[in-house]
Image (tube, helix red, strand yellow):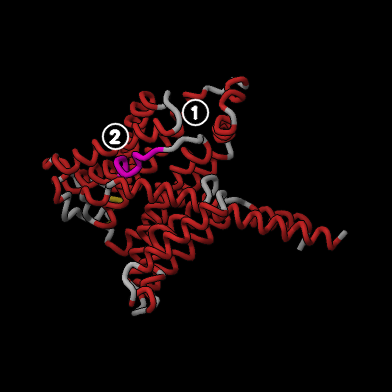
Amino acid sequence: MSIKEKIKSNQTVKHPLFSFIILIVVLAVVQLLFMFTDGIISLTVSKAIAQTLIYSIVGIGFSILLGYAGLASLGTAGFMGLGSYIAGNLLIGYDMPFVVTLLIVAVVAIALGGIVGFISLRIEGMYLAIITLGLSEILLELFKTQNTFTGGAAGLRKVPFAKLANLIQLNRETSFFLILGVLFVMIVITINIINSPTGRAMLAMKNSSSAAQAMGISILRYRLLAFIIATVYAMIGGALFVAYNKASDPTSWTLALSLNILAAVVIGGSRSIWGVLLGTFIIFGLDLAVLKNIAFFNNYPGSSMIFSGVLIVVIVMFYPGGIVGLFNNISAKITSARLKKGA
């Protein structure tokens, strides 16, 4: 292999998308095993992975808000629910291609995120969290009472599977690949955002708002942008939720979901996409995909939730940088030890 070929190969491996492409391929193979084999992958595991990927999209958007802009929101569930109802009504009433549905949901998210963000982002800290919590509760109450749009307490039922295009009708199994595709697109967008001047401006704002202002960074502008991005990701996640589950009801969009998304981002690592994926799997997928297949956790109902809770507490108490931060520290120590031996 020539020197140029070695350099090109090394650059490919180090590219930030390389590892995520491997992940997408592995998950696609797992789903194909579920579809074309009997018993290797169960329906429960397939659903758990799909739900984890949907919440991962929401968590990645939230990580930009929390990890880069330094803002905390408790309105994630409300925005996600709104996205699910908009997409559900479009699928029921208009049977339009899902790409068009996602675009409509994204446009509504940009408008709503801009309005809410402009009103609330002049307030910092816990007050912003309280405002977004109040907004989420208002949306939840509307979900319960607006029978025409949301189906009331019963929610939307019998939502048809989406059409990817006019000639491609999806089903439960193929919807999994739609989720994978959207996740990959959102990862690409996120990597470009955090590596751009916008991402660096947000991080500077989080580290020191006064220093960022002295550098000419508009605090309100970048806070608003981060809030809009998080809203778009949340509502797209809601649209994927209703497209995969064929239903949406108010019990899915409570405060508990907002807190779980927050916990997933924190324990995984709020500035790492891999951290969000790992944290989301621990919160939403570990119980169904792994623990339910272990006899001990089946014999003692509730023990899986206790295990997950203890894991969260340990990570937050002892590794505030999240799982990825822990891995980075271990890797740095190993590298340092090797360098010392080499010296």
Q: Quadrant of residue 304?
A: bottom left
Q: Residues within 10 Å of mark 2 (few under 14, many from 20)?
A: some
Query: Is residue 287 shown left or right of residue 155?
Result: right
Give the overall secondary structure of the magenta segment.
helix
Query: Is residue 232 shown left or right of residue 218?
Result: left
Residue at the image point whose x is 37% and y is 68% from the top: 303
Q: Residue furthest left?
A: 147
Q: Is residue 75 magenta?
A: yes
Q: Is residue 12 visible in the rendered structure shown here?
A: no
Q: Which mark is residue 135?
A: 2
Secondary structure type for disc 2: helix
Q: Is residue 155 magenta?
A: no
Work out whether residue 216 or residue 279 is closer to the camera in this orientation and state it. 279
Please tell me whether residue 328 is drawn above or below residue 99 in the rendered image.
below
Q: Amino acid at mark 1?
A: Tyr
Q: Which residues are magenta?
A: 73-80
Q: Give the label, 1 or 2, closer to the camera.
A: 2
- Label 1 sits on residue: 222
Q: Is residue 302 visible in the rendered structure shown here?
A: yes
Residue at the image point whose x is 34% and y is 71% from the top: 35
Work out whether residue 89 or residue 122 is closer to the camera in this orientation and state it. 122
Q: Amino acid at mark 2?
A: Leu
Image coords of residue 109 (percent x, y): 33, 35
Residue at the image point whose x is 16% and y is 43% from the top: 144
Please tell me whether residue 73 is drawn above or below residue 178 in the rendered image.
above
Please tell me whether residue 230 is drawn above or below residue 343 in the rendered image.
above
